[in-house]
Image: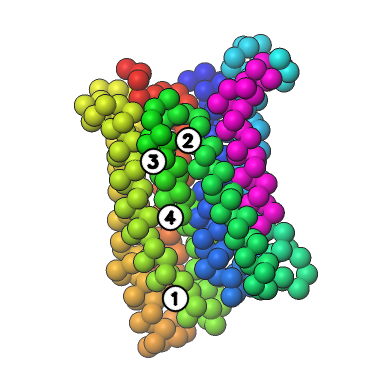
């Protein structure tokens, strides 16, 4: 891996973190809109930094592609001629869609940081939700117009957009959820609402996982022509590792849904002051979040240093 490939992997990982946080974090934000303290915590400790990271990664990724083309060292990343040429390609198209998505997502957070918490007003909520939907649509288009699927059919482009939406709604919600669970460990008054949010997320999680798996496997089939390359190519081997990590994450998710979340509710009914179940759940969500970051790194590597058509 040369320096440009490394730069591509790291900057693309930053983009993925930003996009997943915008979609998944937005889902938790909407679910928590009746809890102003929760909303502000999610925005200030998760979404604000993640969206800025994604915005920075978007710019860095484009600059790295310029440097990779002209091979003139660090000074070459600012070559205006190469940059103008790349702006007319799928790279430029993806750049515009991602920049638009991050700007829309950041606009959604403005009411949260204003005095008086105007997000509680229905009109403001509707406006922000519309911006969030448009931001998610921009991100879906950005992954469809650039990458391996862009050279295939419209079906492949739709599948990659759905794959992003599904995995973002699940994996992107983990860190905000971890923040809320950790906070509920210390604040006993939040635990009832926390249990309701966990149950709501668990119900939606199965739909997210089903869409993620079906779209991911279908994409691999369309890109490689079958599953024969799973063991014979670097792309297939990375895909297997990615599937294995996702399987572990799914196992943790099932553990949350069928053990820890019901136990949180039982403890609330029998011993409201006992936070042990929430503590265990927080640790498990933290581990799942770290695994999600590993999946992002694997995905960035699959789309940067190798491809479905390489041996």
Crowding at mark 3 (Cα within 10 Å: few <14, some 14-19, many 20+)? many
Which disc is residue 99 wearing? none
Crowding at mark 4 (Cα within 10 Å: few <14, some 14-19, many 20+)? many
State the image coordinates of residue 293 (x, y, percent, origin top left).
Answer: 47, 45
* Measured Cα–Cα span from mark 4 to mark 3: 17 Å
Q: Nearer the viewer, mark 3 or mark 1?
A: 3
State the image coordinates of residue 73 (x, y, percent, origin top left).
Answer: 66, 14
Which disc is residue 196 wearing? 1
- In the image, residue 60 sits, relative to residue 50, either above or below, namely above
Horizontal side of residue 41 vs 298, given as left or right = right
In front here: 284 or 76? 76
Which residue range is magenta in the image? 82-108
Give the structural element (helix, strand or loop) at label 3. Answer: helix
* Measured Cα–Cα span from mark 2 to mark 1: 35 Å
Mark 4, residue position: 170
In front here: 223 or 66? 223
- The answer to whether one can see residue 148 in this image is no
Crowding at mark 2 (Cα within 10 Å: few <14, some 14-19, many 20+)? many
Mark 2, residue position: 144
Q: Nearer the viewer, mark 4 or mark 3?
A: 3
At 54% from the left and 43% from the top, the residue drawn is 139
Of the two numbered discs 2 and 4 on the same chain, state the one appearing first in sequence.
2
* Measured Cα–Cα span from mark 2 to mark 4: 20 Å
- In the image, residue 307 sits, relative to residue 267, either above or below, namely above
Q: Give the farthest residue toward the right.
A: 115
């Amino acid at each position: 891996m040369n320096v440009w490939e490394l730069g591509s992997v790291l900057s693309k990982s930053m983009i993925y973190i930003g996009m997943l946080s915008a979609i998944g974090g937005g889902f938790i934000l909407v679910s928590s809109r009746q809890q102003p303290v929760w909303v502000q915590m999610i925005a200030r400790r998760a979404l604000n930094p993640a969206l800025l990271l994604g915005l920075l990664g978007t710019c860095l990724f484009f600059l790295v592609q310029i440097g990779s083309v002209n091979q003139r060292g660090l000074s070459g990343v600012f070559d205006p001629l190469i940059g103008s040429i790349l702006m007319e390609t799928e790279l430029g198209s993806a750049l515009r869609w991602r920049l638009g998505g991050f700007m829309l997502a950041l606009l959604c957070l403005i009411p949260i940081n204003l005095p008086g918490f105007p997000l509680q007003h229905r009109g403001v909520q509707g406006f922000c939700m519309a911006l969030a939907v448009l931001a998610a649509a921009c991100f879906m288009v950005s992954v469809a117009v650039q990458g391996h699927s862009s050279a295939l059919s419209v079906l492949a482009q739709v599948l990659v957009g759905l794959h992003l939406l599904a995995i973002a709604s699940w994996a992107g919600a983990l860190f905000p959820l971890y923040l809320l669970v950790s906070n509920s460990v210390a604040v006993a008054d939040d635990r009832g609402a926390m249990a309701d949010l966990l149950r709501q997320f668990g119900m939606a999680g199965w739909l997210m996982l089903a869409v993620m798996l079906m779209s991911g496997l279908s994409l691999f089939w369309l890109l490689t022509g079958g599953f024969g390359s799973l063991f014979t190519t670097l792309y297939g081997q990375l895909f297997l590792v990615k599937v294995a990590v996702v399987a572990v994450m799914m196992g943790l998710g099932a553990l949350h849904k069928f053990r820890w979340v019901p136990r949180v509710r039982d403890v609330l009914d029998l011993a409201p002051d006992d936070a042990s179940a929430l503590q265990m759940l927080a640790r498990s969500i933290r581990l799942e979040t770290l695994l999600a970051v590993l999946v992002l790194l694997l995905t960035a590597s699959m789309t940067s240093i190798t491809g479905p058509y390489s041996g």
